[in-house]
Image (cartoon, rainbow, N blue to C red):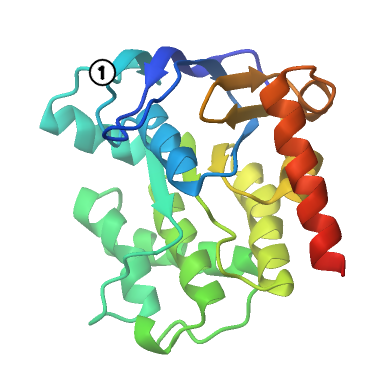
Amino acid sequence: MSGEVLVRAAGLRPDLGERRTPPLDCTVSRGSITCLLGHDSEQRTAYLRALAAVDPALGGRSEILGVDGMDLSTEEWRELRRTAAFVTWAVPLLSVLDGFQNLLLPAQYHQVGSDREIKAEARALLGEMEYDADHGILPAYMSDLQRRLLGIARAMILHPALLFLDEPFHGLDIEARNRVCAYLTGPVRRRGVTLVVACSELPFARRFADRVILVAPEAALSFDSWKAFAGSTEESVRRFLELERRACVFDTD
């Protein structure tokens, strides 16, 4: 992991309507995994979308890959999405195209290579999944896991430097979550992509996060490791971890 900063936020406040959003100060370094945690999924998503400049923020400053994220023209926003991809758990695959055709679309639209080169890259991405599924079927007939992996691969075909992931483990069973985790921390990372992940999957954050951001109603806090986060004396951190511990005990029962 290099020290080059790809994302920088200062006093960043997403728009959640009437709800208060505490300011966030953070950086994201090249080659790192950053996890956004918090009990409120809507709040997690709002901060992720503001960091990625997908949605306009209420205030503060943000910079993504050297670009001012607070003042983007339509064309600049579209160009940024090529290098700073954003993938939601509800993957918006085109229903009338099969999986392989869906995977090709971004590269064909942006004309990143010849038809032969694009198809070869798509096949390489499918091979990296290590998931034996029929990608010649329509999205309606796919499993949640297949759609989730295809959504990530579809972003990867443009060779982004940054990949923002909104709840990539949402609604998946343990085996499927493990497959998504293996794909993100294996093939995706080997391609040099920096990950920023909003999720409630604490085992993933504990094992892989280089930076942890906790968003709570009263504060948005950034920590440079899981150890620093878990050892923090901040009241919002202690409350979050205690509630998570109780939830785990309840689930075990």
Q: Secondary structure at mark 1?
A: loop
Point out residue 176 in the picture as x, y percentages from the top left corner.
66, 71
Instruction: Please give left or right for residue 133 compared with residue 244 in the image.
Output: left
Residue at position x 52%, y 44% in the image: 40
Point out residue 105 in the picture as x, y percentages from the top left corner.
27, 63
Residue at position x 77%, y 37% in the image: 241
The residue identified by callout 1 is: 70
Quick one: 114 or 25, which is closer to the camera? Answer: 25
Say which amino acid is labelled 1.
Met
Reply above or below: 235 against 239: above
Quick one: 146 or 248, which is closer to the camera? Answer: 248
Instruction: Please give left or right for residue 216 compared with residue 52 in the image.
Output: right
Point out residue 209 in the picture as x, y percentages from the top left corner.
71, 35
Quick one: 130 or 212, which is closer to the camera? Answer: 212
Image quadrant holding the C terminus, namely bottom right
Residue at position x 81%, y 62% in the image: 250
Residue at position x 40%, y 86% in the image: 136
